[in-house]
Amino acid sequence: MRNRLLFLFSVWILSACTDGFEDINKNPNSPETINSDYLMSNVVLSSAYYYQTQAFTGRAANAGRYITLVRNTDYTNFNWGPVGWWDPYAYLTLNYTLYQQAKEKGEDQYLAVAKIMKAFNFGYLSDLYGDIPYSLALQSKESGLTRPAYDKQEAIFPALLTELKEANELLQTTTKTIVATSDVLYAGNTLKWRKFANSLRLRYLLRISKNYPQAFTEMQEILGDKTKYPILESNADNPEIKYLGTLAANSWPGGTLAMIDFDFTKTKASKELVDRLTARNDPRLPVWVAPVTAATGATVDKNTYVGVPHAIADPASYNGGETHISTFSTLIRKNADDKLKASMLTYAEQCFILAEALQRKAVTFSGETAESLYYKGIDASMDYWGVKAQATTQGYAAQPLVKYDGTLEQLITQKWLANFFKGSEGWFDNRRTGYPVFQPGPLSLLSKMPQRFRYPDTETATNNENYKKAVAAFGADDEYTLMWYLK
C-alpha cells in the first residue's frame, strides 16, 4: 500500500514540477495538472483504505479491543512509542491540490468533496493525537513552510465543522456534476455526498459536545431540516468502498493478498469481543469469528468460540494452545466480499449517535426516540452482516442484555459491536464514555487505557521548536494526556 501511495504522491509532485521553468523547458507531452476528478478518486480511495486498515491491523484495533495479538505483541501490550503520521498528511497534501485547483477553476462540486475529505482526514488526525499542525500545514509548496506550528484542537474541530457545512451548501446549490466514473464512493451522487458531510458533522458534534457548548444546537439544526441537511438513511448511503480483491493494494486488509498467513494467524479475536457476543447469543459471532479447531483439551474456556485476553504471558498458549482459541472467520480472510468494505462512517453508527443524543434529552428528532434509534442501529448492523432475519427469528432484541434499558453502557456496547472493524470508533467511544469497560491487561506497559497517540519522532527531529511549544500548551506527549474534547 505504501508503494501505491508513494506513486500517487509522486504524481502530485510531478504535476507541478514545471513551475518557474522557461517555456522551452516544458514537455508538451507531459500534463502540468491532473483533472480534478482523478485527484478526487485518489484522495477518497487512499483515505478510505488507510482508515479501514488501521481498524483491522493498527494500534486502534487493539485499543478498541477487537483483536489480540499472540505474537509480536507490542501493540496489544501498549508498547506503542511515537506513531508516524506520514500517510494521512500525504493524502491531505493531495487533497490540498484538489481543493486549490477546484477553487481556482470554479469547480464547486470538487471543492465540496475536497472540504469533506479535508474534514475527514484532519478530524481523524486530531482524534488520534490532539493538537496537530492544521492551519499552516501543507504549505511547503506555496510558501516553503516545512516546519508548521500546531493548532489547538478546540480551534480545529469548529473549523472542520464549517468546512462540512459549506460542502453541503455547495453541493445543494451547484449545477455542476461529479464525474460518476471517477467517483469511487458515490458514482457522482451529490445527495449522498451531502449526507456524508452532514452525518460526519453529527459524529464530530457528539464527540466534542462535552466542551463545545453549541454542539447540540448545531445538531438540532441538522435534524430539524432534512431537506437542507440530509443525513444517512440506510446502509445504502454508507460512505464506503468495496474492495476489488485483485491486488494487495485493493484487497481487504485481512485477505490473503494484503496480509501474510503469519500475521493473520497471530491476529486473534479478543476475549472482550467474543465474550460479549456469546453472552448475547449474537448471530454476528460466527460471521466474524471462527470456532476453535480442537474439540477437547481446553484448559480455561471450553466454548466453541474463544477469545484471547489482552497483555497476558504467552498468549499463544492460552486455553491449551492455538487449536483452542479463535482466529477470525473465513469471511474476514477473503480478499473481497460484499460485506467487506473500506468504511468511513455507517448508518448504524449514526443511529447510535442520535440515540445517545436523544437519550441525553439534548435534541429531538421527529418520529424517533432514543429507543427506536437504538434498535435501528442494531438492525442496520445485523442487515449489513447478513443476519437480520436470524436475529429477528431468535428474538435477539428481547434478551435481557439487549432489550433497551436507557443506560449509556448498553447503548455504547451495542454501538461498539456495530463498529466492529469500522475505523477507530470503538476506541474513541470507549475513551469518551468509559464503555465498554476495558482493562489494559497484566503485562500492559500502561496502567490504564490509552487516550491518544504520541507525536511522531520526526517532529522532535525536524520540527522541534514547534513540537516543544505544542507540548507546553497541550501537556505531556504520552498516551495518558487528555485532548481538549475529553477533558
Image (cartoon, grey):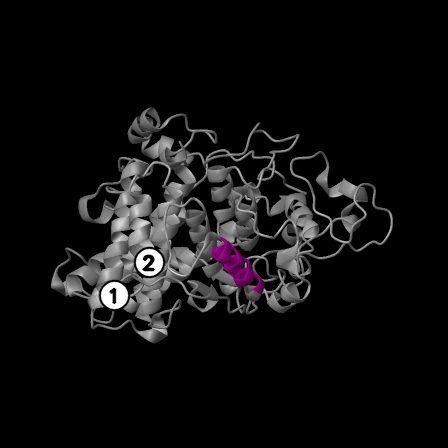
Tag count in the figure?
Answer: 2
Residue at 60% of width from left, 47% of height from top?
66
Is 173 on the left-hand or right-hand side of 350?
left
Rate crowding at label 1 as few (under 14), some (14 to 19) or many (20 or more) other CA atoms within 10 Å.
many
Relative height, residue 128 to residue 358 (above, below): above
Rate crowding at label 2 as few (under 14), some (14 to 19) or many (20 or more) other CA atoms within 10 Å.
many
- Cα–Cα span, label 1 and label 2: 10 Å
Picture coordinates of residue 10 (x, y %)? 34, 57
Assign a secondary structure to mark 2.
Answer: helix
Residue at 47% of width from left, 35% of height from top?
451
What secondary structure characterizes most of the magenta part? helix
Relative height, residue 167 to residue 214 (above, below): below
Q: Which mark is residue 197?
A: 2
Residue at 54% of width from left, 40% of height from top?
435
The quadrant of the rendering that contains the C terminus is top left
| Residue 373 on the magenta span | yes
Assign a secondary structure to mark 1.
Answer: helix
Is 226 on the left-hand or right-hand side of 237?
left
Picture coordinates of residue 330 (x, y %)? 67, 62
Mark yes or no: residue 95 visible.
no
Mark 1 and mark 2 residues within 8 Å of each other at the beta carbon? yes
Which stretch appears magenta?
Answer: 371-382
Q: Which mark is residue 171?
A: 1
Q: Which residue type carries mark 2? A: Ala
| Residue 410 on the magenta span | no
Foreground of the two, 411 or 83: 411
Q: Which residue type carries mark 1? A: Leu
**Residue 393 figure quarter:** bottom right
**Residue 28 figure quarter:** bottom left
Picture coordinates of residue 285 (x, y %)? 67, 57
